[in-house]
Amino acid sequence: MEQYPVHTMIELTVQPMRSYSCQAGTVDIWCPAPSLMVTRVAGILVDEAATAIEDVMLRRVTEDGRLIVFNDWEQMTDYEQAARTRLTEASMSILETLDGGHFLLRSRVVVFGVQIANAALRKLAVHPSRASFERSLGDALRERGPAA
């Protein structure tokens, strides 16, 4: 797996609440504020890792009633079809409570997958730069306050 420089996301200095790692890639998940979830993926998003994201996402909606998700997938190189299908279907199941999904992407394959998902969801935004992504994440953190 090709290594990319690790960028620190603003105000996410605590350990992730959930992580998944295998030879293909890694996923870290944070919930730094009520109804706010952040994911970071490096390498290939496998279905087992997508299951971890889905589990946290559905639990947050149950606990908080609403959800906005920030996905730092700049280091993600590819995904398993089952992973994209799982996350799209999970997002569809909570569509009325989903305030949006924000993405930082580099891989053209991943950009295409997000575009396909957005054709159904119509609530996803791809940020043109890390600065734009982190500015939106910072705004969401300020609006929602720290996690209890």
Image (cartoon, rainbow, N blue to C red):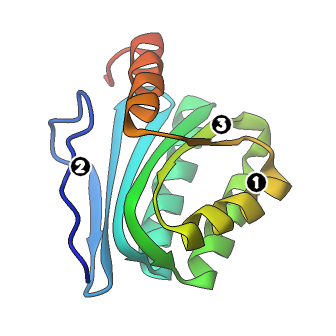
Q: Going by the picture, which residue comes out furthest to the bottom? A: 23
Q: Secondary structure at mark 1?
A: helix
User: Which residue bears the numbered disc 3?
Assistant: 100
Q: Nearer the viewer, residue 139 or 74?
A: 74
Q: Is residue 65 left or right of residue 120?
A: left
Q: Is residue 23 left or right of residue 111?
A: left
* Closer mark to the observer between disc 3 and disc 2: 3
Q: Is residue 101 left or right of residue 52?
A: right
Mark with earlier residue (1, 2):
2
Q: Is residue 60 left or right of residue 29?
A: right
Estimate the spatial distance between the alpha carbons at disc 1 and disc 2, rounded to whole Å: 26 Å
* Closer mark to the observer between disc 1 and disc 2: 1
Mark 2 is on which residue type?
A: Pro
The N terminus - image quarter: bottom left
- How far across and down, in percent of the image, does residue 143 sit? 47, 12
User: Which residue bears the numbered disc 2?
Assistant: 16
Mark 1 is on which residue type?
A: Asn
Residue at screen point 58% across, 35% down: 67
Is residue 34 shown above or below 51?
above
Residue at screen point 71% across, 35% down: 97
Is residue 72 shown above or below 44?
above
Estimate the spatial distance between the alpha carbons at disc 3 and disc 2, rounded to whole Å: 21 Å
Residue at screen point 67% across, 67% down: 112
Mark with earlier residue (3, 1):
3
- How far across and down, in percent of the image, does residue 108 sit? 56, 68
Q: Which mark is residue 59?
A: none
Mark with earlier residue (3, 2):
2
- How far across and down, in percent of the image, does residue 104 sit? 47, 48
User: Which residue bears the numbered disc 1?
Assistant: 118
* Closer mark to the observer between disc 3 and disc 1: 1
